[in-house]
Image (spheres, rainbow, N blue to C red):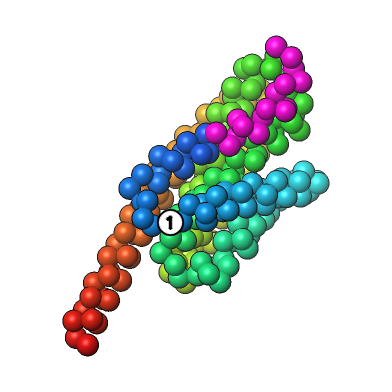
Amino acid sequence: MDGQILPQASLFLGIIPALLLLYISLKGYDEYYKDKNIYLSFVGGLIIGFISAIIEQFSVAVGILFIILFPVLEQISKTMLLNIRRLQANRETPIYGLTLGLGFGAIFVPFSIITANMTTSDLLNLVLLLIGSFGIILMHGATGILLGYGILKQQLIKYFAMAVLYHIPIPLLIFLTTSQHIEFLQVGVIFYGIIIYWYISTRILPQIKTHTEKRKRTTRIIKENS
């Protein structure tokens, strides 16, 4: 197989699993979002993810500081796009945070493949990279939910800090893992991504339905008393 095909097709290696995860995660929430905004937030995540990846590529000289600086940069990038006026205090903002985060994480898959000059002949390394990259997609989806929920609850500072803290273990794993044990890094990242995605999505996304039911009850009571 031609080694040049991989970089050209690598974008789909990030987008396809991100979209599949989004499809699975949004089951049961059809009435809580607009399709147009899902599309825009995912594409927006791809764009700011690409910009962040470029900035980080030129900032690798910061050394060990990347353990803190990169998570802060990436979470700020997502917050800037997510915290627009029309999404503030809206029930669906955590869903758009999820979508934005998945798009953001998806772009790191092709970026990692291309910057590593990886081809289809590097099958084992490619599989390991894809495993770890899916963990990163999960982490960004989870922290996107946190940011969206913070905007919904008007407690952005608190949930931004939580998103950064949940992000830090991944660059820490990268720093602690030697090149001889890269497989442990990728397995560690995917397990960490699965755990925090499950934990955050199952705790926060159902709150959207609860928030909506409370608003409906409040509206009904007001109408009954008026």
Visible residue check, residue 65: yes
Type of the residue with mark 1: Tyr
Q: Please tell me in which quadrant of the rendered image residue 123 appears.
A: top right
Name the residue furthest left: 224
Start-end of magenta stretch: 1-16
Location of residue 97 with respect to 226 vertically, above or below: above
Q: Where does the C terminus fall, quadrant-wise?
A: bottom left
Q: Is residue 73 magenta?
A: no
Which of 157 and 3 lies nearest the eye of the viewer? 3
Residue carrying label 1: 33
Visible residue check, residue 170: no
Name the residue furthest front: 36
| Position of residue 84 measured from the top left corner of the image (x, y, whole percent) | 58, 67
Name the residue furthest top: 1
Horizontal arrangement in the rendering, residue 145 relative to residue 170 (left or right):
left
| Position of residue 34 measured from the top left corner of the image (x, y, whole percent) | 46, 56
- Chief SS of the magenta region: helix
Horizontal arrangement in the rendering, residue 34 relative to residue 9 (left or right):
left
Residue at image coords 44%, 44%: 197
Which of 196 and 169 lies nearest the eye of the viewer? 196
Q: Where does the N terminus fall, quadrant-wise?
A: top right
| Position of residue 31 measured from the top left corner of the image (x, y, whole percent) | 36, 55
